[in-house]
Amino acid sequence: MGRYTIRRLLQMIPVLIGTTFIIYAMVWALPGDPFSGKCGQRPCPPAYVAEMTAKFNLNDPLPVQYFKYLVNLLQGNFGESFSGRPVWDEIMQAFPVTFRLALIAIIFEIVIGISAGILAALNRGGFWDNLVLISTLIVISIPVFVIGFLAQFTFGIKLGWFPPTVGPNATVYELLLPALVLASLSLAYVARLMRGNLTENLRADYVRTATSKGLSRQRVIGRHAVRNSLIPVVTFIGADFGALLGGAIVTEGIFNIRGIGGLLYLSIRTREGATVVGVVTVLVLVFLLVNLIVDILYGAIDPRIRYE
Amino acid sequence: MSEHLLEVDDLYVEFRTRDGVAKAINGVSYTLDAGETLAVLGESGSGKSVTAQTIMGILDMPPGFITGGEIRYKGSDLLQLPEKERQKIRGAEIAMIFQDSLSALNPVFTVGDQIAEMFQVHRGMSKKEGMKRAVDLMEQVRIPAAKERVKDYPHQFSGGMRQRIMIAMAISLDPAVLIADEPTTALDVTVQAQIMELLQDLQRERNMGMILITHDLGVVAGVADKIAVMYAGRIVEDADVLTLYGEPAHPYTEGLLASMPRVDTKGEELYAIKGLPPSLLALPPGCNFNPRCPYKQEICLREVPPRQEVAPGHGSACHFWEEVYRARTDSAS
């Protein structure tokens, strides 16, 4: 397994170079002048434009530009935004917020999603099954911004259970409601996935064997059937965690969260090329690492998986 | 009346499906004593496995419904016992082995873990003690290097070894009755013989009653004491092995025996019972075998034949058992 991990880590290098190059090329290839409107009402003085152009190597051919960027990156230097603020600082300010949000959302997915799935599978065709099926269908069909505004209005403003927006510190309590909104779609999928898997596994031969061993129904379901049903669910949740760490532009926007999604959105709007590339690089790295962890975890819960 | 270890008495089971009611078991009775092997023979859908699952109490209910009969184990009717009591018997006193050992073992637990679970649940042992017992059992079913292999997963074993694990698990608590549901069907022939031999040895050592469910006449011959032949949810003939093979008194049994490949008929076309087994959703009236029976008369369409005593310990549910019986015994002499 050590060799497998090393190989996977090595595979990240070309992926990382490839993605950063594509992003880099695309960001700076956007038409228009990145320095227009940077100096208030007046056009920027030529001296400023010249200085900025030199600072971001914009006169070099694209591969050279990219190479210079990469060399800096490997030294841990993510560059600066136009205003002179280190990109790394910006990322480090936004990322912990997004990480907390994603973590709470994942906990919601695991706890509510899996329990709802189990409840539905054990009451197939009954009240709980139909409740889970219909409510998840509703969640899947409604766009997330509608759910977001609805939740904010109902629970944040009308009922006042949660703060309607998130302050600069982004405390766990403030993040509960946004995390639930963020988790809602995946939660619905997790519930349905769990329900389907468990329904199928309850009919599996090894469950019949477990019953014929004289085990109680709780033990048969809890230890034998649920365990096997979790395998695909864990994969889904793992991949989803990687995606959630990439920030959630819509949810962060609704609840005024200063997370990575908002930072990325703002940087694209203001043509902050260095910030966009820096953020994406970090996101790609995080996503790859999370996936690697999920794949290793996958082997721990399913012994039939072999790492070669 | 002498009491048997296990007694299935006039059992009726049906499956209520969307397409209608499938009458899977229609009045099955048999008995089993300690140290005895009863082979239940029949083709797919004849109800042999459903009977076993009903004894174990692992029938899917619904769609399965037990509509009549008793299953007496050591005198008490299992079907009347509360679920808690049945759990104590299940696995510990009446154990079962399944056909496909790969799907019958849980893929995510080690084999030792799965065997040890028996001791943990029924005997309240710790996992560590259970694992020690698991190694002992794996040695008893002749798995080489049991100590190392106890921590392996089911998919790391060959089919024959996996079936040995199933057997080890089933015999772990010294059950009085062992039900083997086609234990060798998924295995190749040489391994089949080893597994049957193992089962027979274990049975003798422990004086277990064994119900061997199979459709393979060859497997039965060497192992069974008595045989019950099932067709469409009924026992059509029951006898001890020699009698049944030598002097069948039911046309279905006769057909089964005739369809066995034999060395002396090599090269000739194999005999086959014409027609198909009936749909359990729409059983033919009268004798269920009548559409395929060469002895069919008008009465077979009207009346279900009751079990008739051919000889002590030999019964046949055929209106014309005498003709079948005589045809055979005459040609033999």
Image (cartoon, coloured by chain):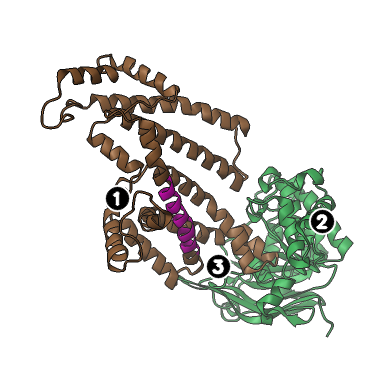
Q: Are marks 1 and 2 on the same chain?
A: no
Colour displayed for chain B in the image of the structure: green
- What chain does badge 2 belong to? B
Q: Nearer the viewer, mark 2 or mark 3?
A: 2
**What's the distance in space between the residues labelled 3 and 1, CA to CA?**
70 Å
Q: Which residues are magenta?
A: A99-118
Q: Given the image, on which type of amino acid does mark 1 rest?
A: Asn
Are circles 2 and 3 on residues that touch, CB within 8 Å? Answer: no
Q: Which residue is mark 2?
A: B133
* Farthest residue, direction bottom: B1
Query: Magenta part mainly helix, strand or loop?
Result: helix
Q: Position of residue A206 (x, y in %)?
A: 63, 58
Q: Chain of mark 1?
A: A
Against B76, residue B249 (above or below) is: above
Q: Nearer the viewer, mark 1 or mark 2?
A: 1
The label number, if any, that marks residue A256 in the structure image: 1
